Image (tube, helix red, strand yellow):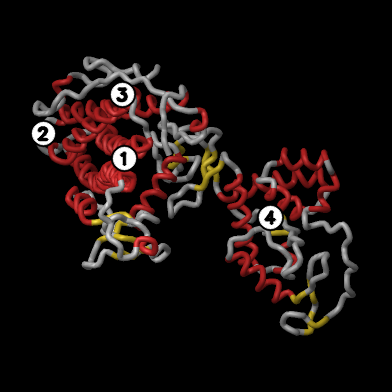
Amino acid sequence: MLYDGNFDMEDEESGTKLAENSDESIMDSQDEWDNDDDDLKQVDSDEDDSEEEKKWIIKEAVVENKILTYSEILASMQAVIKDVQSVLQQPAGICRILLQNHKWSKGQLLERFYEDPEFLTNTNMIPSDPAQKPEDGPRDCDICCENTELVGLSCNHMACRDCWKFYLAEKIKEGKSIIECMASDCKLLVYDFNEFVGDDKEMITQFEKLTVNAYVESTSSISWCPSENCSLAVKSDSNGIVECSCGTKFCSSCGSAPHDPATCRHVKIWNRKAEKEKATSSVGFSTDKDTFQWILSNTKDCPKCMTAIEKNGGCMRMSCRNQQCRFEFCWMCLRQWSVHGYSPCNTFSEEAEKNRLDSRAELLRFMFFYNRFKAHEQSLGLEKKLIQKIEKKMDEMQTAGMCYSETLFLRKAVDTLSDCRRTLQYTYVFAYFLERNNHAIIFENNQNDLEMATEQLSGFMEQKLDAVTDLKVLSRNVQDKARYVEHRRKVLSEHCVEGLEMENWVLNE
């Protein structure tokens, strides 16, 4: 519950570290692989990238973390408020807002206070010249005209409690936890929430959640679990992949699914570009090569907004279909129609043609990486069906005399397959921004090795699992393949991280 703006709880070695093909710690024997499969390459890798990017990189290993419940987060927040309150000697509500305005940095807030104790009067909570408080007793509310007891801030913009509750409820719906006085020209902040909502527990709980969310969002070491059915948070002292007790793994920096080796920054840029291309492509995205050939052969890009335009009439006067653009141009030479008019365009412009071809080449390049990104995303979703098949196989193995712990290698292999598939997915985001050089070639070799190993494990799990009748042979085959593909994933991920640390990557945006 809230009291005076405070909350009381009621419940609750470079990449050359590659294994040799004969390394028995990775595989008992290369013969365990299918005879019709090519030997997977073991390519030395030696990579690095930039200091600016280090803060964005996602480490492939799950970092140490602590699981926090809502109550534990609330208690942590309260402790910070009390520490500040003991120094500032101000109500808890004022201390909460001050902390929120300083991104919940107690040190930053107290440092400012010690430098200038008078700054508190400039925080829109403690007026330097408070208005004289009106007399107690019922009065007419200026908003609803009801004759009742009025409440307000020290600015004396008074209103009845019902009007205040309606106003605060609207602000809560807007997701605001720092709320100004309801008077349009007043910037004074509401710090004592209880005074205006009384014992309305629902509003108090909603406001409490908003404040806790603001605390978590401003605390870099704490992140909410992104799973829809989970209300826990994860605390980690370093950026990387964290795992909630519900089993969900996510990036502690951006809150999204693990995306190594791509950085948080480049994933965001990639997503924005994908949305832009979807919006401007006349037929959308597909993995069908013919579709892209059709786009390149039958459309031209609007010279202003680059939306793909299909000619659907005989007239050369074209109008961009993008409602925010509507640029008119000539289909033949792409010049603005207001300048071009109906005059002939029979003079070749080398610069204009070069710009058009460059635009198309960039689109084709993006499509190349995007198709492969989506293909692995699709495979990742489809391979979830393996879980039911694996569980059935585990039951059969237990019936044949194996204990439960001896069958867990199957489930672990599926988890390994999912991790490798997700890493492969985001290698194409990384590769899209990567400038091609000797380091990029080594990266592509590692990517190729991981892709081959992943597809062989996936093919074995989906198509050949039931064909092996000897359970000991099955166990050895699956574990060998799973260990090897996980090894390839670690080699690639560590190689990318080393590249960032040593500033060898050239990543273009």
What residue does disc 1 label?
Answer: 425
Q: Which one is earlier in the sequence, the residue at label 1 or at label 4?
A: 4
Q: What is the quadrant of residue 508 in the picture?
A: top left
Observer-nearest residue: 348 or 57? Answer: 348
**Residue type (three-letter) at the residue carrying disc 2:** Thr
Dot 4 falls on a residue whose secondary structure is strand
Given this view, does label 1 or label 3 mark the residue nearer the observer? 3
State the separation of the CA atoms marked 4 and 2: 62 Å
Q: Which one is earlier in the sequence, the residue at label 4 or at label 2?
A: 4
Dot 2 falls on a residue whose secondary structure is loop
Dot 3 falls on a residue whose secondary structure is helix
Q: Is 501 above or below relative to 303?
A: above
**Residue type (three-letter) at the residue carrying disc 3:** Ile
What numbered label is drawn on residue 7? 4
What residue does disc 3 label?
Answer: 442
State the separation of the CA atoms marked 2 and 3: 39 Å
Q: On the picture, is 151 further left or further right than 1? A: right
Mark 1 touches mark 4? (CB < 8 Å): no
